[in-house]
Image: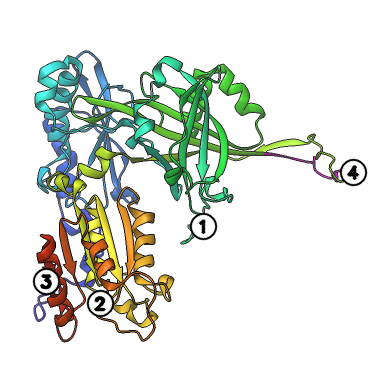
């Protein structure tokens, strides 16, 4: 209901579920199945107290005969789309584990609030099944021109993941089938690999790792550790196992994926049954990254196991300072969890900004790293510019955090070092160099490189000089120097109050 005075939506009406907000829509959805001669079983009926509508029916599908379908209407219906599941069907494409069918293309433009579940199920499900079974050009022509990464279907609740760089997606894992792996972690605390707490803590443990190396069963090296600039971020080493699947395992849960891995490799299964500590397993498979283009996809499993004394029995003390801890006791283990793989490859970094590809070979020098220069540098780094040379003399004050992108964490740091550290943390592929420079500073006692030498170093090899000092006299001097060196110039300055001009 709309308030006649304010014209705003009445709060009581706003909280109503969709089947009460739009009277008759629920009955129309159910009745529409009958219009297509489809039998209906209501698995969840809002009229009987359920908080959503779930309809089960059956249809004859090409090559499969009578097939169970389940249509689930979300709380946000009809603004949000329903989902159609075929739990007993196994399609090679366009179906997630659990049966969710891709009957509607992604994107809000492909949904209309007037769509009804029975109509989509009756017309589109048989068409989807037929085109997937046929494959070839007809399937390709009917699809959105994008990849279908199968690892996206393995959902993870862990706060973090394992970085996979260019080496990890290009290794020939199919030939080796399984073996050992080495992971690097940023810190020794591995509690983020435990099942997430049921209390819904707002700040659960977090972590991040990197796939460092792979060996086959005979310990022959398949993947060597990366250069230290990347591996050095993850100094804590942990050994695990990996296995390759030519066809993705069908699994809805971490336990189902774990069971599929154990059934696929006896040697890995024996290792997991006796391993104490964190058992880490990499699962890799072919994955479509673009339509018709495949790379190696990854997902990881983790399970924590340890031994503890039987109830009522105290552990015996060790004899001797260096004596090993007794290994007897009851084996205890957590449920396995899925840990997502985080792709960090040239393709993943550039596919969202193809127009900026020429910037990979560009060099930009920036003088002045205040509230305009610093965010400019950050955007250049995110655009994957080839190299940045940063120049400033000042440090970061806590009070400037209301406008400067680097706040209290970097207070007291020299701006050049703070920005360089930020770039190294977030965009390590960008080369960064720094110069401590205050243009025009006059000191009674002077040592080290001269101002001319510093400016020459800043301009050397630069395609663009950016001055964000907001000082007109500095800009005039830098302009003269850059003209002499044939370097293009860009100037940023602030105006009174909050804001700036380019």
Residue of label 3: 480
**Residue at point 39% right, 18% down?**
174
Discs 2/1, front: 2
**Residue at point 15% right, 37% down?**
105
Total labels: the figure holds: 4
Farthest-out residue, top: 63
Residue of label 4: 320
- Nearest to N terminus: mark 2 or mark 4: 4
Which of these two is toward me, 459 or 309? 459
**Residue at point 34% right, 69% down?**
449
Cα gap from disc 1 to disc 3, whole angstroms: 63 Å
Q: Residues within 10 Å of mark 1 (few under 14, many from 20)?
A: few
Discs 2/4, front: 2
Which of these two is toward me, 488 or 450? 450
Residue of label 2: 439
Magenta stretch bounds: 306-320
Discs 4/1, front: 4
Mark 4 secondary-structure assignment: loop
- Nearest to N terminus: mark 3 or mark 4: 4
Cα gap from disc 2 to disc 1, whole angstroms: 56 Å
């Amino acid at each position: 209901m709309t308030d006649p005075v304010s014209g705003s939506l009445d709060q009581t009406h706003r909280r109503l579920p969709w089947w009460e907000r739009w009277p008759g829509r629920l009955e129309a959805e159910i009745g529409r199945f009958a219009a297509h001669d489809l039998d209906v079983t209501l698995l969840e009926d809002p009229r009987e107290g359920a908080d959503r509508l779930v309809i089960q029916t059956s249809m004859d599908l090409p090559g499969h005969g009578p097939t169970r379908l389940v249509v689930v209407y979300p709380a946000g219906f009809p603004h949000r789309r329903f989902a159609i599941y075929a739990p007993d069907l196994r399609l090679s494409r366009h179906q997630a584990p659990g049966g969710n069918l891709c009957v509607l293309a992604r994107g809000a433009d492909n949904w209309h609030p007037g769509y009804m579940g029975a109509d989509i199920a009756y017309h589109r499900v048989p068409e989807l099944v037929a085109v997937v079974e046929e494959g070839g050009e007809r399937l390709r022509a009917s699809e959105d021109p994008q990849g279908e990464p199968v690892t996206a279907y393995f959902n993870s609740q862990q706060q973090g993941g394992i970085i996979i760089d260019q080496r990890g997606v290009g290794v020939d894992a199919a030939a080796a089938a399984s073996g050992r792996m080495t992971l690097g972690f940023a810190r020794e605390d591995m509690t983020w690999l435990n099942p997430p707490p049921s209390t819904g803590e707002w700040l659960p443990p977090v972590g991040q790792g990197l796939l460092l190396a792979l060996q086959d069963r005979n310990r022959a090296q398949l993947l060597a550790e990366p250069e230290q600039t990347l591996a050095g971020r993850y100094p804590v080493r942990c050994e695990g196992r990996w296995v390759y699947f030519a066809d993705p395992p069908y699994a809805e849960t971490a336990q189902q994926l774990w069971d599929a891995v154990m059934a696929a490799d006896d040697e890995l299964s024996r290792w997991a049954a006796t391993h104490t500590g964190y058992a880490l397993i990499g699962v890799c498979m072919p994955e479509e990254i673009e339509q018709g283009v495949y790379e190696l996809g990854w997902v990881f499993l983790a399970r924590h196991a340890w031994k503890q004394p039987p109830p009522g029995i105290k552990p015996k003390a060790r004899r001797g300072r260096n004596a090993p801890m007794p290994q007897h006791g009851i084996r205890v283990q957590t449920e396995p969890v899925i840990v997502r793989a985080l792709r960090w490859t040239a393709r993943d970094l550039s596919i969202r900004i193809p127009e900026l590809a020429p910037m990979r070979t560009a060099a930009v020098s920036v003088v002045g790293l205040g509230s305009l220069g610093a965010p400019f540098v950050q955007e250049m780094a995110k655009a994957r510019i080839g190299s940045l040379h940063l120049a400033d003399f000042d440090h970061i004050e806590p009070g400037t955090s209301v406008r400067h992108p680097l706040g209290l964490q970097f207070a007291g740091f020299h701006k050049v070092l703070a920005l360089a550290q930020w770039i190294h943390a977030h965009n390590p592929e960008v080369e960064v160099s720094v110069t401590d420079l205050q243009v025009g500073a006059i000191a009674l006692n002077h040592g080290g490189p001269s101002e001319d030498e510093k400016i020459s170093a800043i301009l050397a090899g630069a395609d663009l000089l950016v001055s964000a000092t907001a000082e007109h006299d500095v800009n005039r001097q830098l302009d003269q120097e850059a003209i002499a060196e044939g370097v293009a110039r860009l100037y940023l300055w602030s105006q009174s109050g909050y804001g700036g001009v380019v």
